[in-house]
Amino acid sequence: MRDVKPLFLLLLLHRVTNGQDNGKWSSTTSTEISTVVGCKVEIEWVNAGPVDEFTIYKKQEHILSFHSGVSDNLIGNERLMINQQKRRNGELITVTINDVEIGDSGIYTCKLLPSNHSKNVTLTVTDLKWKTGKEIKAVNPWTPVQLSWEYKDSSGTAMVTAVRRKPGNSDWAEILARWEKGSVVQVHDLLRSRLEVDNFMTTAAGNKRTSIVLKDVTREDLSYQYRLLLEFGKCQKYSEPIDLIPEQCEAAPECSMTVRNVLIILVVLLLLAVISLIIFSYILRRRFIDDAANTERNRYASNRDIALSSRQVTPLVPEPLLDSENGNSASTSTRNGTIGENETVEKSKSSNYESSS
C-alpha cells in the first residue's frame, strides 16, 4: 500500500499538468486569414500541451474530428484535410482546404478533448477578378512605357509583386517591384534608376490599380513578358502577361532594327555625306586654282612673244645673184641704177650753177 499511494499521486499530478498545458494556445498562430477563390489555405492552431483528441467546428457545425492519430471527415468534403504534428512549442493542428470557395468563409473552431479548451480562426474568402487581360504594347525604344494592372480584391492582404521573364522560361523570378499593404517595399537594384514605382491607386469603381514606368526601354526590355503577382499566404495568382514590341515593327514582329540603330545609321550617312562634300569641294578648288594658273601662264607667254616680236630688227637678206626671169645680175642692175641716179644729181647741180652765172 505504501508503494501504490505515491504512484497514484504521481499519475494524478501528471493528468492535472496535462490538463493545464492542454489549454495553452500559442500566440504565434493567426486568428484571421484572408484568401481568394481557387487558392489552397491552411488554418493552424498550436497548443502547448500534448493533444490526443480534438474536433473542428465551422459555424458551430462539427466538420472534422481527430482521435489517436485517426481523422474523420464528418461532412464528406474531399477538399478538407486535417493533420497533426509535434513541434518544439507544442502540437500543431492544421486544417487544409483545397480550391477554396466563397462558401468556405466563416469561423473555424478547434476544441480540445476532454478539456474543451477551444480557439477560433476567421477565414475570409473573396473573389479575385482581373480587370486587365493579355496585352501587347507597341513601344518606341529609348522612350518610357507604363505597365498597369487593375484588379478587384476585397481582402486587401495580398503581397503584390511586379515580375518579368523571357518567353520560354517557367520561372518568374526577376522582381521589378514589390508592395506590401499598399506601400513599396522593394525595387529592382539594377533597374532602380529606370523604374518609377508608385503606391496603389483605387479607381472610382473600387478596383485596385498598380503601375510601374520603365524609362528608356532597351532592346533587352523588349524581350521580356511582364506580369503582376498576388500572393495570399502560400497561394499565388498571376495576371495575364504584357508583351512589349517595337512600334516600328508592330506589323512585322520579325523586324529587329530599333530606332537607335536607325539613328546611328543616319548619323554615319550624314558624316559620310559631309566628308564627301569636303573632298568634292577641295577637288573643285584645286581644279579652279590650276585652271587660273594655266590661264595666267598662257597670257604671260603671249605677252612675252608680242614684246619680243616688236623689238626684233629685220635682217638684210642678200638678193639672189641671178634674176629668175631675165638672167641678169641683180648686183649689176642695182649698181647701174645707183650710178644713173648719181649722174642725174650731178647734172642738176651743173645746170643750176650755170644759170646762176
Image: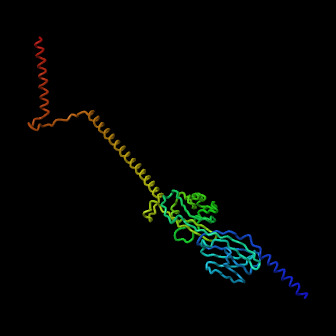
Q: How many numbered tags mark residues here?
A: 0
Tell me the quadrant of the picture where the C terminus can be found. top left
Of residues 331 and 148, the one drawn nearer to the viewer in this rendering = 148
Above or below for 9 versus 272:
below
Instruction: Write the residue at 43% across / 54% down.
Output: 269
Q: Given the current orientation, which residue lies at the most extreme top position?
A: 357
Of residues 294 and 115, the one drawn nearer to the viewer in this rendering = 115
Q: Quadrant of residue 9?
A: bottom right
The answer to whether 222 appears left or right of 113 in the picture is left
Q: Given the current orientation, which residue lies at the most extreme right position?
A: 2
Of residues 96 and 324, the one drawn nearer to the viewer in this rendering = 96
Of residues 86 and 7, the one drawn nearer to the viewer in this rendering = 7
Tell me the quadrant of the picture where the N terminus can be found. bottom right
Position of residue 317 measured from the top left corner of the image (x, y, whole percent): 20, 35
The answer to whether 159 appears left or right of 131 in the picture is right
The answer to whether 339 appears left or right of 245 in the picture is left
Q: Given the current orientation, which residue lies at the most extreme left position?
A: 326
| Residue 210 shows in this picture | no
Position of residue 163 measured from the top left corner of the image (x, y, whole percent): 57, 65
The answer to whether 17 appears left or right of 168 in the picture is right
| Residue 108 shows in this picture | yes
Position of residue 130 measured from the top left corner of the image (x, y, whole percent): 55, 66
Q: Given the current orientation, which residue lies at the most extreme bottom position?
A: 1
Q: Quadrant of residue 21?
A: bottom right
Q: Quadrant of residue 57?
A: bottom right
Position of residue 117 measured from the top left corner of the image (x, y, whole percent): 75, 75
The colour scheme used here is rainbow
